[in-house]
Image (cartoon, grey):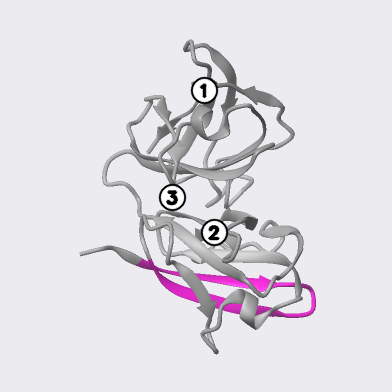
Amino acid sequence: MTETQTVQATVSNPRMGKIFTATATNDQWDGNTLKDSLSSQQLGILMPGTVVNHVQCQYAGGLAAWRIQNAATLTFQRWGFGVKDGLACYASQSVNPYTVNPNDILTVYPLPAAIAGSNVLAWVQTSKGVELFEAKAVVDATSTAMTTVVNSQTLGDSMFNSTLGSIHVQCQDGATLDSVEIIDNSGGTVLTLYGGVRAEGGATSIEYNLQADGLAVPIGKGFALKVTTTA
């Protein structure tokens, strides 16, 4: 049986907000569209022309990435991670102000907790755009390559000849991100960043194991994005 979980999100501005919900299928990229809890309408139909600056997304367990996507052009307008139900934080779950387009949908990509090891997601933004990367069932203390969710490409294949601007990483509930590495085509280490745990007390973020912005790493052919975790 395919696993599902309840995902819900509020999309809001200082004057108003709406609740969007879905029974989302784990490990499914397309089709997990959240709809208004009262009218069952999609985001763009319900809120066209509305400027929003907060998306508070919650999942039942594991981890999840959300995106506001133009259904006509397939471009991502805003994106981020959800948090476990009950750990929402309005202050930290903000986005740059965005005017909702009538074609926009709010969709989610959830993963359950791995039976062994850790499931990991990463939003990677470069001068070419943004892609969601994943690594599943990462064995503890083992550097593991991440690939794009859409077509399983490595960093070098997907983002060749671009400049890396940011990496935002989310590991499954309770897991620790030990490090993130950028590896070149000869196996050399270009960049290493340490991560941590997400907040259930003591950490600084409920969304991110790593939030690295302001980077400027040229991405070459054969480059790899690797993560090391502890479940």
Q: x%, y% of residue 61? A: 40, 59
In the picture, residue 165 is in which quadrant? top right
Q: Is residue 54 left or right of residue 172?
A: right
Q: Distance between the residues labelled 2 and 1?
A: 26 Å
Across and down, in percent, residue 162 comes to: 65, 30
Label 2 Cα neighbours within 10 Å, binned few <14 / some 14-19 / many ≥20: many
Amino acid type assigned to the residue bearing label 2 in the image: Trp
> Which of 157/145 is in front?
157
Residue range highlighted in magenta: 5-24
The label shown at residue 223 is 1
Question: What amino acid type should be assigned to the residue bearing mark 1?
Answer: Phe
Q: Which amino acid does label 3 sit on?
A: Asp
Q: Which of marks 3 and 2 is nearer the N terminus?
A: 2
Mark toward the viewer: 3 or 2? 2
Q: Label 3, label 2: how many angstroms apart (C-alpha)?
A: 16 Å
Q: Which label was assigned to residue 66?
A: 2
Identify which residue, 127 or 10, lies in the foreground: 127
Q: Quadrant of the C terminus?
A: top left
Q: Residue at x 44, y 48 (%)?
A: 150
Q: Is residue 75 left or right of residue 110?
A: right
